[in-house]
Image (tube, coloured by chain):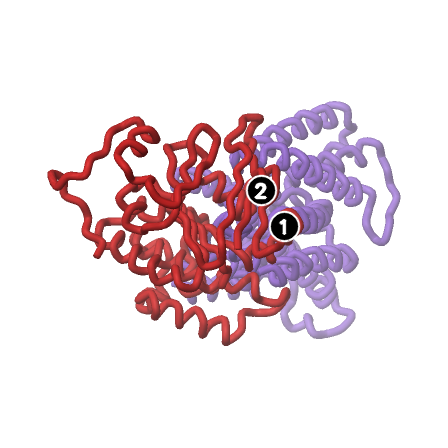
Amino acid sequence: MTKLLWLVFIILTLYAPFVGSANINIHEILQADSLSSYIFFELRVPRILLAFFTGMGLALAGLLFQIIFRNPLMTPYTLGVSSGAILGAGISVKLSIGFTILGLTATSIFGFMGASITILLLIVLASKVADRGAHTLLLLGIALSLFYTAALMVLFYLSSFTQLSTIISFTMGNLSTVGMTTLFYIALASISIAVMIYFNRHELSILSISAEHATLKGVNTKKLSFILLLGSSLAVGLIVSITGSIGFIGLVVPHMMIRLYQKSGIELIFPIAMFGGLFLIASDLLARSLSAQEIPIGIITSFIGAPFFIYLIFKK
Amino acid sequence: MLQLKNLSIVYDKEIILKDVDLHLAKNSSLTILGANGSGKSSLAKAISGLIPFRGDIILDDLNSHKLSVKDRAKLSTYIPAKLESYDLQISVREFILIGRFAHKPKWSNYSTTDYQKVDHIMSDLGISTLANQALKTLSSGQQQLSMIAQALAQESPLLIFDEPTAHLDPKNVVYFVQIFTQLKKRYTLVLITHDIQLAQVLKQPILFIQNKQAKLYRDNFFKPETLLKHYGVSFSHNNTYLGLDFD
């Protein structure tokens, strides 16, 4: 079962670069200067790498949030970090701000700021309701998301037609904005999350039992949670500020791997990272091949993730 | 080993305990008794650094206010009545290994010595066969033993047991008392319980908590008139009811 799952997803990944709106001639791929070679190496492969690192980062951030809050429904997405990024990006589009810093567009930078402000807000709020359990924070995240959505609706209302289509594509997630610089940023963000988790794996393993238990065994839980939440949220902020909103990866992937391997989440850092990447590549493949026109990736992941979210609530 | 000076605990603006003073010598032991909600667990949690307090707690001549979380874990640990865990997949061996965390240098893995200590403790407590089982599959008694094993791996000289027999069947209660008696030689032990029979069997000084105050009894606690005063119900020595035989 486990092997079959991996096999299917690896085959899909290898198949993915050959699928797209333009047909490529397999014999020409290795010929320099051919159109097929350009599409394959300059467009398709970077896009697959982008999908891989995005999925990896979002899956690992989900794992981290679930351990820190000890709740399977916690992810940066369910807490409103993505909504914050979209609102930030939306504001920059509406105000027609068009600068670029270090290869990042104003939309990305505003998106990053939106995500960062959201997480700082959540950390402040979390410290106020720390003794009321993770569900309170989850509700706060949902309330924040609803508020952001309302603000986004105002932007929609005020925007011109072209502005509108830009904002909407960001809302639904978009992996086509590929360039080597953005790929670099997303890889950097995802690898940082992986490094943060790996170097704190022993602490996180104890925190997976309970915060009280971790304190008794010598883990400074407050400091650890603060640093990891802030660090991983900034990384997620960077990812979603480029790709737009891609939901539910952080919810679905860690849970699937824990069920599959019957091990603690923290012992599955590598499978979760890999499967997060492959899962998003497969979702992107679906998005590109279901219809003649590409379906936004965020819609695909939400169609899979939202029912899964409901399933998780009932399973508890 | 443990000294409490003017210790007060306030939670949600309500005073739980007021001005508790106590001196517990190394390798001595103490039983804490008191009604439900009298603040027994709060006292234990304050000593273990889980909840804030006023006054001073001195662990092994070090003031608790100045201890890092890690250093405190090397001095004392608290064993709750029941283990609450979010992660249900962790194996017993990995769980006990967590006791070694405070002794492990940061960034490094657990050493072979750590694993050896864990295996040794498991065989001492007779739970070696459970090593690879998931913690969630264990019975209450086995979980209790795993928590004790983890506390022993932690090598902190002060161990605080909170209601250790609350979820145990009679056989495991007797086994627990055997283990506890063994530990008395090497550890400073504090045991919180509701079970007066257990307290009587252990023959330790009693710290009785009532009306936010703590009073120490070296002996004379189990006289019927004292018990009546403390618990508001009468106790009598008779053989009408069946009592558990701990010998």
Q: Are marks 2 and 1 on the same chain?
A: yes
In the depicted view, which residue is nearer to us: B76 or A51? B76
Q: Can you see residue A249?
A: no
Q: In the figure, B214 relative to A220: above or below?
A: above
Q: Position of residue B185 (x, y in %)?
A: 40, 63
Residue visible at 61% across and 39% down? B55
Residue most toward the left?
A: B240
Mark 1 highlights which residue?
Answer: B63
- Measured in 3D between alpha carbons, the distance from the residue under mark 2 to the one under mark 1, in whole angstroms, is 11 Å
Instruction: Determine the secondary structure under disc 2.
Output: strand
Q: Can you see residue B226?
A: yes
Q: Position of residue B141 (x, y in %)?
A: 30, 54
Q: Position of residue B168 (x, y in %)?
A: 28, 49
Q: Position of residue B57 (x, y in %)?
A: 58, 46
Q: Amino acid at mark 1?
A: Asn
Residue visible at 57% across and 53% down? B59
In the depicted view, which residue is nearer to us: B118 or A286? B118
Q: Amino acid at mark 2?
A: Lys
Q: What's the colour of chain B in the image? A: red
Residue visible at 64% across and 53% down? B68
Q: Nearer the viewer, mark 2 or mark 1?
A: 2
Location of the C terminus of chain B (image quadrant): bottom left
For label 1, the crowd category at 10 Å Cα-Cα, with few meaning under 14, some 14 to 19 and many 20 or more, is: some
Quarter residue A14 falls in:
bottom right
Q: Chain ID for label 2?
A: B
Q: Chain ID for label 1?
A: B
Instruction: Determine the secondary structure under disc 1.
Output: strand
Quarter residue A310 falls in:
top left
Do labels 2 and 1 touch, CB within 8 Å? no
Mark 2 highlights which residue?
Answer: B5
Chain coloured purple here: A
